[in-house]
Image (tube, rainbow, N blue to C red):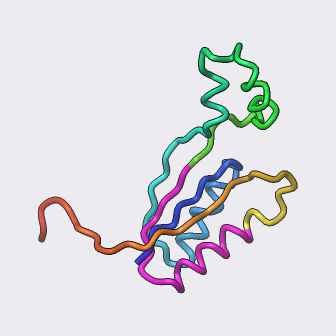
Amino acid sequence: MFVLFIVLNGTDYLEDILAKFVDIGVRGATILDSQGMASAILESRNRGIPLFGLFESLVDDSRPYNKTIFTVLENEELVKKAVATVQDIMKDIPQPGAGFMFTIPIGETYKMGKSN
């Protein structure tokens, strides 16, 4: 089992990704509102420090927030399908930094709540 994390800066593609996940058999995902470090620093009260000018040039002000999606996938085949799906949806985005993905292997999962 694996968890696939997707940090999606191009949030306009969120619905497309989730719809395709359903099509390929991904049974669930969690979506979090998130913010990159550079954007958070720029929002802080430390803007007067010269180093932050560098961050300012790296951050797209029109999209200071992103979405982080994570999903637990049963096997490597489904991981490959999910990754290929996201890459296909995002392939024509002209700007770099539209997001990134990574996986982490899972040792065990545990259900919570009343069992039936």
Q: Residue at x 78, y 25 (%)?
A: 53
Residue farthest to the front? 50
Confirm whether the magenta stretch covers residue 108.
no
Counting every numbered tag in the picture gives 0
Q: Please give left or right for residue 1 compared with residue 24 in the image.
A: left
Residue 18 relative to residue 12: left or right:
left
Q: Is residue 34 above or below residue 40?
A: below
| Residue 84 painted magenta | yes
Nearest the viewer among 40 and 67 is: 40
Q: For the C terminus, which image quadrant?
A: bottom left
Magenta portion: prevailing SS class: helix
Position in image of residue 57 (x %, y %): 82, 32
Magenta residues, start to end: 68-88
Q: Quadrant of residue 84?
A: bottom right
Q: Quadrant of residue 86?
A: bottom right
Q: Residue furthest right?
A: 94
Place of residue 51 in the rendered image (x, y in percent of width and height, measured from the top left): 73, 26
**Given the current orientation, which residue lies at the most extreme bottom position?**
77
Is 36 placed left or right of 77 in the picture? right
Position in image of residue 50 (x %, y %): 76, 20
**The N terminus - image quarter:** bottom left
Image height of 6 relative to 47, above or below = below
- Closer to the camera in the image, 59 or 87: 59
- Which residue does the image show at 66% across and 73% down from the upper left? 85
Give the percent coordinates (x, y) of residue 41: 62, 27
Residue drawn at point x = 65 percent, y = 61 percent: 16
| Residue at screen point 52% across, 81% down | 78
